[in-house]
Amino acid sequence: MMLHNRVRSLSAILVASAVFAFSSPVFAQDVTESHLKAARAAVVAIHATDPFDNILPQAAAALEQQLIQKNPDMQELIGKTVTDKAVALAARRADLEKEAALAYAKVFSEKELNEIAAFYSSDSGKKLLDSGPTVTRDLVKAADIWQNGLARDLAQQVGETLAAAAKANAPAAPAAPADATAPAAPADGAAPADGDAPADNTQN
């Protein structure tokens, strides 16, 4: 529980560092102060760096657990030392905020950044940020179902077309040969074949 509380406290320090970074002076000569200010506002509005909030606390917690396992008799000292050092490093969060603002300033104009910040600071923009992941998951599920159905129907329709073409192009089956053992019927008036007895035409 103590470790968990320290991690939460460290997270709060990281957030404070981010605020400090956004209020820092201009740190790039090729970006105007107003442009950079708009970039910082946009970064804050879209929570661009929020996914990285837990990096340092998680690293500190993992290191503390690792060291305590190796040196259980130094648990108290390890906990205090890791927390103190992590707090000192928290100020480096400003470097990430700096890079984030510069990255957005390089891609978006000052006007675009102001529009982005205005939208994502509105109720609609905040809802989009909050509900966006849920909508995205639902969309991915729907896309998977749609993709599977599309692939199935495509394969079925192509298969049916190819089967019909193969059937149409198949050679006709040859006619069954006549039975060679069966005697041919004689034509009317034809002489009987050798060995056949002549018909008896005598009248009694």
Image (cartoon, rainbow, N blue to C red):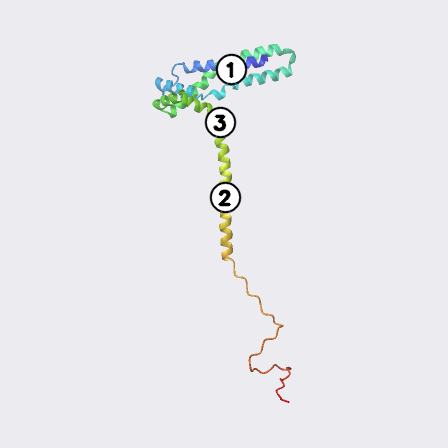
Q: Position of residue 36 (x, y in %)?
A: 37, 19
Q: Which residue is mark 2?
A: 153
Residue depicted at x 47% and y 29%? 136
Residue depicted at x 45% and y 23%? 129
Q: CA distance from mark 1 to mark 2?
A: 51 Å
Q: Secondary structure at mark 3?
A: helix
Q: How many marks?
A: 3
Q: Are marks 2 and 3 in contact (CB under 8 Å)?
A: no
Q: Earlier in the sequence, mark 2 or mark 3?
A: 3
Q: Looking at the image, is mark 1 or mark 2 nearer the viewer?
A: 2
Res. 109 image quadrant: top left
Q: Secondary structure at mark 1?
A: helix
Residue depicted at x 46% and y 19%? 96
Q: Position of residue 137 (x, y in %)?
A: 50, 29
Mark 3: amino acid: Thr
Q: Which residue is mark 3?
A: 134
Residue depicted at x 52% and y 13%? 10
Between residues 42 and 158, which one lies in front from this camera angle?
158
Q: Are marks 1 and 3 in contact (CB under 8 Å)?
A: no
Res. 77 image quadrant: top right
Image quarter in which the N terminus is found = top right
Res. 203 image quadrant: bottom right
Q: Earlier in the sequence, mark 1 or mark 2?
A: 1
For residue 195, side relative to residue 146 (left or right): right
Q: CA distance from mark 2 to mark 3?
A: 29 Å
Mark 1: amino acid: Ser
Image quarter in which the C terminus is found = bottom right
Q: Secondary structure at mark 2?
A: helix
